[in-house]
Amino acid sequence: MKYGVVLFATDETIAPAALGPALEERGFESLFVPEHSHIPVSRESPAPTGGELPRHFHRTIDVFVTLAVVAATTSRLGLGTGVALPAERDVIHTAKQVASLDLVSGGRALFGVGAGWNREEARNHGVDPRRRGRVLDEKLAAMRRIWTEEQAEFHGEYVDFDPIWCWPKPVRRPHPPIYVGGESEAALRRLRDHGDAWLPDTFDVATYRRVRSWLADEGRPDVPFTVFGADPDALDVTGYEDVGVERIAFWVDPGPEREVLERLDAIAERWVR
């Protein structure tokens, strides 16, 4: 089993240059960093966990800047977006950023993606929230072409470009693994059609067993699972390996360096070492 960490990177939390080496020193295999370009002041979209939206959602550092710094200060750590929101991003720029991160890190990029929960955030990027899943699907298909074809071309409903040259190409072939987040029917179809791994934020082994069976029926029997945002103090991993869980990414509360390092020590002592 591999063990990683999910941690919001903000201007008020442990610096990326300190975080990466601390994770490697403690034996963690990967880091997943959430993304929000901004948070609209409107609270039309409820917080994912209910109640007031925590402060760290408002103050995120750009996910690719964060992971580039972590790449420069580590040698083995997997560098994950957890999750990025490609529906809100320019598709060509995003393809270049992912490939560039993979290049400068020596093939360590892990591209976690989701449709996003904040409808107003999508709307501010010019994306109809009702169609953000379909926009995401097209952009994933277009990025795969950019990463794998010398002259990439794509013509869809939401993404349309004539042949382009776009380098660098990713180090990992055919491209960095796409980790699809979410458990909805649309997310699972996205996993089947575009994903290389599943990034669920449910911890129920029965759900994993059901999805594993469905993937097998759909011709995708070997998709690995990464448990996303698990509570290291409460998680029961009984049956996880049997259903193809390859990694557990533990949630770590964002905070100043001393608090985060103490939390990492406690998690590593229990799970990693």
Image (cartoon, rainbow, N blue to C red):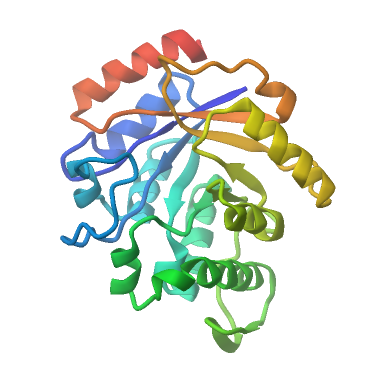
State the quadrant of the N terminus: top right
Residue 134: x %, y % from top left: 55, 70
Please name the residue shown 50% across and 47% down the image. 105
Please name the residue shown 56% across and 86% down the image. 160
Image-based side of 47 in relation to 150, left or right: left
Q: Is residue 229 above or below residue 136?
A: above
Q: Nearer the viewer, residue 250 or 40?
A: 40
Image-based side of 10 in relation to 191, left or right: left
Image quarter of residue 72 = top left
Image-based side of 77 in relation to 50, left or right: right
Residue 109: x %, y % from top left: 53, 48
Image quarter of residue 39 = bottom left
Residue 249: x %, y % from top left: 48, 31
Q: Nearer the viewer, residue 248 or 184?
A: 184
Residue 76 visible to an observer of this rendering: no
Q: Nearer the viewer, residue 114 or 96?
A: 114
Image quarter of residue 108 = top right
Residue 39 visible to an observer of this rendering: yes
Image-based side of 59 in relation to 17, left or right: left
Q: Is residue 79 above or below residue 164?
A: above
Give the number of callouts: 0
Judged from this view, the residue extending furthest toward the bottom is 162
Residue 192: x %, y % from top left: 70, 55
Please name the residue shown 57% across and 28% down the image. 204
